[in-house]
Amino acid sequence: MRQTKLWTHLLLTVLLAACTRETPAPTAPPAKPPLTATTTRRLTNEPGLTDEPGLTQTPTVVLSPAAEPRTASPPAAAASPTPLPAPSPTAVQPTPTATPLPSMPVAVPAGQVLIHESTLTLSTYGYEAAFQKTEPDDAVYPYPRLLSEQVTPAEPKDYAAIVLENDYVALTLLPELGGRVYRWVDKATGRHLLYENPVIKPTGWGYRGWWLAAGGIEFAFPVEEHGLNEWRPWSYSISATGSTASVTVSDVEDRTGLTVGATISLDAAHDYVVIEPWVKNNTESEQTFQYWINAMVTLGDNRVSGRTRLIFPTDQVIVHSTGDESLPGAWQPMTWPIYEGRDLGLYKTWQNYLGFFVPQVTEGFVALYDEAADQGMVRAFTPGWPAGTKFFGPGTLPSRLWTDDDSSYIELWSGITPTFADITTLAAGDTVGWAERWYPVHGIGSVTSANAEAAVALLPSESGAEIGCTVTAVTAGTLTLWVQNRAVEAWDIELTPIEAFHTTWTRPEGSEGPLGLTLQDENGQMLIRTGGVP
């Protein structure tokens, strides 16, 4: 019965998408698609037309792959999970944010991944006018220093943009700003998960003594902090079929001669984006380096909620830097998430800035969850590889340090080395890399455990527990609650990535003991487990 419902749901989804089109879905675009004029939206710096200061929506004609015009349409209604037995669970349906950022993506034809090239206009300070050449004895040579007093006022600047999207998420990459993923939209909720700085403005931070806090996911290489070449244009290539698509960005780094890059991919079946950073040594000698990717996260509205929770499955972190004198100093251990009775896992408890490394993430995931918006994101990876996980939040620092409005962010890092104090080497002719899967979650209250297939929440309460589950692809299966290694409740679920399962459970008298939760697919394969389970 579950399988019949699932196929019915998929058929309805395809039929609904087809009704929004006047012509059949386009065939898979070639790797280098022909370009044709279409109308899309871009951001300019003319004020007054949107809720976001300094940004407006203006139509502009740009070039994109030849394809039929696409129109926004709501996701198809999904079948409700079937509870076995009571209490009845509910499927949490998508709810748009009250104040979405502008330039929402349109829905793609069902079951496809599309790429198109566009233009994004951002207010940009004249930082290149303030560049100062360096000499070989300078630690940042051959990269420029910057004289802040010579930076010229901000003006509109057009950036080439690549939009990569499927039914569930939409990404915007900016090759001219270090190949970064500037925008990541959860289509289920309409929320923008990454920080999108409305101005490109140099800060006083970073290894060079200046850094562009442009936002998004940046690639930092070959040194600690924000690297050396993240500000300049990177090369890119596009690969696409009807069910998968990817963008590869890369740069030959001046100091080491290493080629550094990342491949960003979507497939039609999943809501996760696969990020694969890599380094290739085309030189004739061994080279040393660090490589980190830094996601500047907001989870919506371009501001970090104080009720954002940092979820790292560990009980200890290593402080990198902090402006909070009540916390341990640099390179000292600190208990996590509770330190001296203070819940540092909740962002509103922070005073001043804090950065720390997470030395061991044995479960292979980290997450951020805004409890106020009921929106989060998960980074899933192979436990122990990549070796480094880091977090930084400016806390109560003034936003004028990185932007011209009150927008804010927090940083989630992953790297090839455990900390900024470590380096690695790569022999001549060798290549090294790794893969991570990033996906949005909503409607489950928080995240207790996650992997590439699903995220679950098991939140004990005075009367029992709150239980949530979300999946990264269409999934039918059974969610089972365990008490003292004994199954006490089971729910048949049929979910897509745009839905979430959520229910409350009241603990019966005499059922004392630790809780556990498992999700198995309809073939009995274990997808995820957490807590006390056999």
Image (spheres, rainbow, N blue to C red):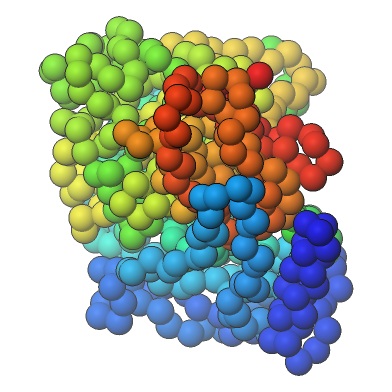
Q: Nearer the viewer, residue 82 or 301?
A: 82
Q: Quadrant of residue 417?
A: top right
Q: Is residue 283 left or right of residue 341?
A: right
Q: In which quadrant will I find the N terminus?
A: bottom right
Q: Quadrant of residue 143?
A: top left
Q: Is residue 513 left or right of residue 327?
A: right
Identify the residue at horizontal 41%, vertical 72% (top origin): 102
Question: What residue do we see at 65% from left, 73% from top?
Answer: 76
What residue lies at 13% left-to-right and 18% top-to-bottom? 325
Q: Nearer the viewer, residue 27 or 255?
A: 27
Q: Where is 151 relative to 207, above or below? A: below
Left of 371 or right of it: where is 388?
A: right
Compared with residue 300, is residue 57 higher up or lower down, i.e. above or below? Answer: below
Measured from the top left, where is residue 81 in percent x and y?
63, 57
**Residue 163 in view here:** yes
Q: Position of residue 391 (x, y in %)?
A: 39, 29
- On the question of residue 143 being in view, the answer is no
Quarter of the image where one finds residue 380: top right
Left/right placement of residue 449 relative to residue 196 reads right
Residue 355: x and y in percent read 32, 25
Query: Residue 415, image x and y in percent?
Result: 54, 25
Which residue is most to the left?
325
Q: Residue at x 30, y 81 (%)?
A: 49
The residue nearer to you, when weighing 93 against 503, is 503
Number of numbered tags placed on the structure image: 0
